[in-house]
Image (cartoon, rainbow, N blue to C red):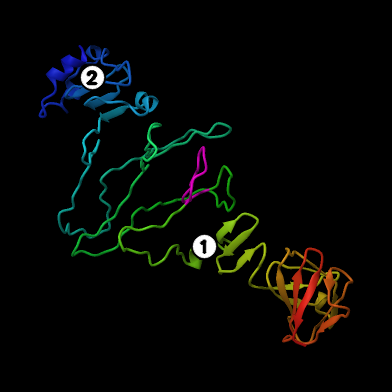
Amino acid sequence: MSIKDINVGYRTKDRQLNAVTQLVQDKVNEVIESANTFNSFTYVIAIDALHRVTIKYGALNIPSLPAWDQSFVRIGKALTSKESQFAVNIQANISGDTGATSSYEKIGLFVLIKTADPSGATQRDAVGIDGRAYINPAISTGRAWGMLSMAMILVGGDGMLCGHEIDVRNQGSDQASVELSTSKYGLQLVTIDNPATVGIFLTRQGTSTWHKGFFTKPAFLATGATFLELEGLFTVDRNGILTCQAARYGNESVVISGGVITITKSDIKIDTEGAAETDDLDTINGGVIGQVITLRTVDSTRDVVVKDLTGNIHLMGADRTLLDRFYRLTLMYDGTYWVMVSRNF
């Protein structure tokens, strides 16, 4: 049986879908494409020796022949019209009030893949949907979208819209670190080959605008989580505290240990070692060049004597004592010393 035989015998619209079950397996083994270009014909519906179902229409150049060959169900369509076209179109309609008394989801297309194949040195990825769009080498001004999701309210209606929802349902380990075999990502953006322009770009059509660019609530972030992070350089934590190379904002309480404190913020409340009445502060660790901090005591009954040039603190020739919790001493780090900028006592 040839492609022409199938075309003539099963091309009528009322019989084309039934043809899949009517074709006898040993008669269609010949219907296996030998090249990535098909001659023009009306419809071809075939089951090959590997039990793959193929539906093709028109003269078709397969964009990805390996993916085509490895697929169980294959639908091919040459899109040559000057108007919008669809290779596959699935539409569903909830035409009115169903009277449902419990929540439901009605789905236009449902795809599920499960895996029991472990990954290790070899990555074995299960992918629910893989959407790709290519621009041919000869084209320098093409436009291609790997996937488009749209939610729309028609004029006269209203309600909640979500253009694309991504759920991560984790019944495994709680992993806070990235780039591990047990990391969980809500969205991973990967650039391949040459550099890409931007990871996320908020834009608009016409005069429409966004009310918020990015939004979450502190309660939705885990304790100790960061809202934004540039590894080793910049973070905004769940409390809105900004930490970066040049400036580390927020306040913290530290206790002197052997004349030393380590800081990570800008507003530093200092307590004496062992809650002593007085204690010397010689060295401040944890600074970055250009960082500005302000020192104060936790309690007016415990005095902190900030020492000049005993360690890495430069106070312009004299020690400075924080006698009261309202005293403030501001310093800037130059890479070697914390240099006094100002004091209010």
Principal SS element in the magenta part?
loop
Apparent side of residue 16 relative to residue 268 in the rendered image (left or right): left
Q: Nearer the viewer, mark 2 or mark 1?
A: 2
The secondary structure type at the circle numbered 1 is loop
**Residues drawn in magenta:** 184-199
Is 261 rendered above or below residue 228? below
Instruction: State the residue position of label 2.
Output: 39
Q: Position of residue 9 (x, y in %)?
A: 12, 18
Apparent side of residue 113 relative to residue 118 in the rendered image (left or right): left
Q: Nearer the viewer, residue 301 or 30?
A: 30
Q: Which of disc 1 and disc 2 is earlier in sequence?
A: 2
Q: Nearer the viewer, residue 319 or 252?
A: 319
Residue kind at label 1, given as amino acid type: Leu
Q: Is residue 108 something one can see in this rendering? A: yes
Q: Position of residue 218 (x, y in %)?
A: 51, 67
Instruction: State the residue position of label 1.
Output: 221
Residue kind at label 2, given as amino acid type: Asn
Q: Is residue 224 something one can see in this rendering? A: no
Specify the label residue 95 is tagged with: none
Q: Position of residue 26 (x, y in %)?
A: 24, 12
Quarter of the image with the N terminus is: top left
Q: Is residue 265 magenta?
A: no
Circle 2 Cα neighbour tier, 10 Å, few/some/many (<14 / 14–19 / ≥20): few
Is 12 rendered above or below residue 277? above
Q: Where, by quadrant of the figure, is residue 343 drawn? A: bottom right
